Image (spheres, rainbow, N blue to C red):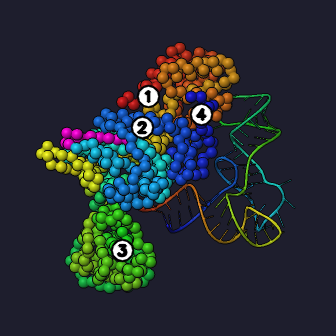
Amino acid sequence: MRFSKLIGKTLKEIPAEADTISHQLMVRAGMIRQLCAGVYSYLPLALRSLKKIEDIIRDEMDKAGGQEVGLPVLQPRELWDKSGRAEAFGKNLFELSDRKERRLVLGPTHEEVITDLVGYFVKSYRDLPVMAYQIQTKFRDEPRPRGGLIRVREFTMKDLYSFDIDEKGLDESYRKMRQAYQNIYRRTGLPVIMIQADSGAIGGKDSSEFMAVTECGEDVIIYCDKCGYAANSEKANSIKAEGVNEGLLEIQEVATPGQKTIEEVARYLGIPKFQTIKAVFYIADGEIIFVTLRGDIEVNEIKLKNLLKATDLRLALPDEVRQAELVAGSASAIGLKNIRIVADESITMGTNFVAGANKPDCHLRNVNYPRDFKVDLIGDIALAQAGEGCPECACALNSARGIEVGHIFKLGTFLSEKLDAYYTDAEGISRPIVMGCYGIGVGRLLASVIEASHDEKGIIWPMDIAPYQVYLCPLFMEDDKVAKVAEGLYSALTGAGIEVLYDDRPDSPGVKFNDADLLGIPLRITVSPRTLEKGSVELKWRCDKKPEIVTLDGITETVTQAVSAAKDGA
RNA sequence: CGGGGUGUAGCGCAGUUGGCUAGCGCGCAGCGUUUGGGACGCUGAGGUCGGAGGUUCGAGUCCUCUCACCCCGACCA
């Protein structure tokens, strides 16, 4: 490709809209352009890399036994009502009507469609197991798109769905996919860690996420250096500080004028935070919920949502708290009626706590569960935090931020039951197909690679997903000899199957070198009067500091070998 | 949806207490001189000041409404 004809211009200045590195670099390199919030056009450079990533994914999916299918983006809303997931997706679902007023959705994912499809063709255990996948555009009306391609509303996603006769088969499919995913990340040059995850709106049992560790990540990973335990903070468990265990004492009222938060109360009374019990108020599917836990611990809203089996959960507004006649700042479960009380297990870890007195400026000492109050539901709803104990080995946990670049789930039979995907087993009994699903966001993966591989000058592409393999960079094009050698090299290399971006622009060396660094093409070949004097050209790897001079004799072979040596080799 | 912010040329920005013809840098076009790490000179094109309404002799500037985009929180690949 001749740079002079390439659609997309490089930018010197950082676009004001972009604040994540990958976003800035992609805009500056002329790879993407935003059309509206969370919707992007892909220019040739981006599309080439995206296609390469897709091809790697395709290759690994095929190797693992997957069959590629094409599925509709336009889907009847009925199907989503039937699976019950329209509600789970809520406003994230893009909805529309056709001319006959039939309600449709733009597919946010394709489990429903594929289950319907496979359920139609698979009738016998002899037809199983099967794996189908597709790489297509999906639509989600995200409340807040952000970070360039990291979180968008229209995006390309690979989804593979596995169909098995039983849990054992599912375990095997899951294992294959996990391996395929590791291969994909290795080949795309993206370091990831696999962590335990909550299964979210999709539901199901086991679930793992593949996280690219980076500061700009949206998720928090809790991990243990010692034993390798790693989980999304939504899912992570931890060992909390031991409470004080002593003989139960009489409840005592104590004045706490103006002290509302746990910090204030603990400081005022001169006690540690873990010697208190706090209260937080939520609205779960319209019902107000009184949540209580030890003062040093934060609520994990995902765990709370799962414990309550709620589809919608949010903090209650001050008005709603007032209406429920709760005394914010001095609330406790003691003596409360007509409200559902949910507790974290931590209230059993310790004795003689300080808790609210349910009247302003007043707390109670020596509160003990279950002596002094009852709860409707108790479970683990605690947020794990760095510094707490690892649930596996008790060592101190760490935390990091990451981008979720893949998520695999054991779905089970939830969807097949709802959508009538049954097979007949060897005994002639009808059983629901056991499903799994495995997703990768292609654009997000691309952005994550840039987050992980760049310097102050620009992108540093791994060879296997670089838009071009070689950046051919002649200096002083008006020199006939330079022009002739460059043109010759361009056609020779292209003819040898090398992907060459040929900077045929009449710009100064500085401009060309800087653009070369910005675009991050792995191998740069510089041709100039200076190199030609010695009958040679200069080779420089984007990831290296120093160039090397190589002779023009056999240059095509030299470059071909260098390029293939730089590939992953899979 | 709650909180915060920004809308002026393709991009990045300036524009005073309202004042006459709306500027600067980059980029773009032409000419010339240069050029191994974002060169220089001259010339030129490019603007409904996000939109609507209002106040005023006069609005980029003040008021009301509205739209878009970005950032922080609740969702996810």
Q: Residues within 10 Å of mark 2 (few under 14, many from 20)?
A: many
Q: Mark 3 or mark 1: which is in front?
A: 3
Q: How many marks?
A: 4
- x, y percent for residue A208: 31, 49
Cα distance between the residues tagged 3 and 2: 46 Å
* Amino acid type indicated by mark 2: Glu
Q: Is residue A233 left or right of residue A420?
A: right
Q: Which mark is residue A6?
A: 4
Nearer to the camera, B76 or A356: B76
Task: Find disc 1 in the rendering and name its residue.
Answer: A566
- x, y percent for residue A63: 31, 33
Residue furthest out toward the top: A553
Q: Residues within 10 Å of mark 4 (few under 14, many from 20)?
A: some
Cα distance between the residues tagged 1 and 2: 19 Å
Nearer to the camera, A398 or A137: A137
- Mark 3 belongs to chain: A
Task: Find disc 3 in the rendering and name its residue.
Answer: A288
Q: Do discs 3 and 1 belong to a common subunit?
A: yes
Q: Upstream in the sequence, badge 4 or badge 2?
A: 4
Cα distance between the residues tagged 4 and 3: 58 Å
- Mark 1 belongs to chain: A
Above or below, A101 against A319 in this view is above
Cα distance between the residues tagged 4 and 2: 22 Å
- Residue sitting at x 46%, y 41%: A446
Residue furthest out toward the left: A427
